[in-house]
Every structure is written in structure tokens, then in C-alpha cells.
Image (cartoon, grey):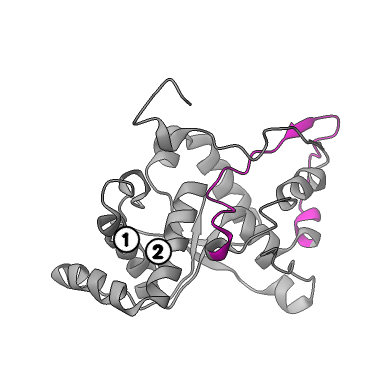
Amino acid sequence: MSGKPEKAGNSESKKDAVLKYAFYLGCATPLRERAYEISARRVLKELGVKLVEMKGANCCGLPIDAVNHEMTLALSARNLTIAEKKGLNILTLCSGCTGQLMKTNKHLKGNRKSRERVNSYLKTIRTEFQGTIEVKHLLRVFVEDIGFEKLKTYIKRPLNGMRIAAHYGCHLLMPSKYLEFDDFEDPEFLLEFIALLGAEPVRYADEKQCCGAVIAGVNLDLP
């Protein structure tokens, strides 16, 4: 069953609304994907989207999930509480961070016992998970909150003549019961976005394969 959301409309209310998010960068993006961060900031500024820095945010917890799941939940939950105190939804760039924060958010909202356990840890640093916000990847913001029709009006240099192959990665789409974005069996939003920019989206056999990052710490030869 598809968890594909409705695309944003092009009504005047949505077109003129000021979008504001708590901006979560995680660990890898500012250190290894600086160009991605810079371009995202510039594009969002051009679109009139306001980003509020999450000062003091920690790792999303994904790298240690297989070792200590409860600690992962606590790390993710602490980040969520930073945005909750600002009253803002979180915007992310890294799909791994997106998946971890979204899974933690939905799990703790629906599991009282786990929520109380995690909050017992957070209490020691004088904070508490409330479950009052949502987490969205940049692509999801483009699809749901801004809309492709509005994005199209901002394109200045179409990528005409380019052929681009998309890689979603695992954590932007799965597990679908938590992420509920696009159709995890046949995703299309990123392909549509590529086409919107004027390029030709290219399909390939392994486009939904794992990139291998999650097992790099165990066996560097496998990725």
C-alpha cells in the first residue's frame, strides 16, 4: 500500500504563506556534504523559507542503533525536544537523519511505555518529549508544503540536456509505516523533481539498493 502524500496545491494561501522550520543538519552533511548544505540554504532563502538553527543539537543516533537502540531513541528524542520548544517542525537534508528522527517521533508518540522510559533519561537534562511536531526531508517540503507548481516559477537555468539518475536511499522511504512518503515500491517524486528542473530522469536496475553506509562500520569491503 502506498504511503504517497498529496502534493501541495497552488492556492494563494499556500503560495503566500511563510514557511518556517527548525533546521537539523546532523553530523555528516556539514562535514562531508557542505555544498549540499550551502545550495539548500540558498534555494530555501530564494523560496522565502525561514530556517531556525537548532543550537546544541546532537547526532540523530542512527550510527549506534544496532548497538544500543534505547540510547538511539534518547538521542533522537533530545533533538525533537529542541524543535518542540521552538514550536517548529524539523527540516532535514540527510535521509538517514530523516528516517531516524521520524521513526523515533512516531514510535514515542504511539508507545507510552517507551516514551516514559526515554523521558526518564531526558529529565536528567531538564527536557521532555511531548510529540508536538513533525519531521520532513527537504524533498518532502518541496512536494507537500511548497508544491512543484510554485517551484517551477523559480527555475532560472533549466538543466536541459542532462540525464540524471536518482538515488533515494533506504531511510527516506522505509519503513513505510513510519515514513509514509511516496510509494516505496515504485517511488516517483524525486524523478518528477528532476524532470521539473529540465533534466531527463534515468531509471536503472539498482536504484533502490542500499548505499552500504550502515554496514561500513562492520565490513568496509561490502559497501
Residue 221 included in the magenta stretch of the image = no
Residue 50 horizontal/vertical position (percent): 53, 63
Can see residue 94?
A: no
Residue at the front extreme?
1
Magenta residues (range): 150-177
Where is mark 1, residue-wise? Answer: 73
Where is mark 2, residue-wise? Answer: 104
Q: Residue at x 76, y 53 (%)?
A: 154
Is 178 situated above or below 156?
A: below
C-beta proximity under 8 Å, tags 1 and 2: yes
Relative depth, front residue between 35 and 28: 28
Residue 153 included in the magenta stretch of the image = yes
Task: Please tell me how crowded label 2 is: few (under 14), some (14-19), or many (20+) other residues with Cα within 10 Å.
Answer: many
- Secondary structure at numbered mark 1: helix
- Secondary structure at numbered mark 2: helix
Q: Residue at x 64, y 40 (%)?
A: 208
Residue 8 horizontal/vertical position (percent): 73, 69
Is 140 situated above or below 219?
A: below
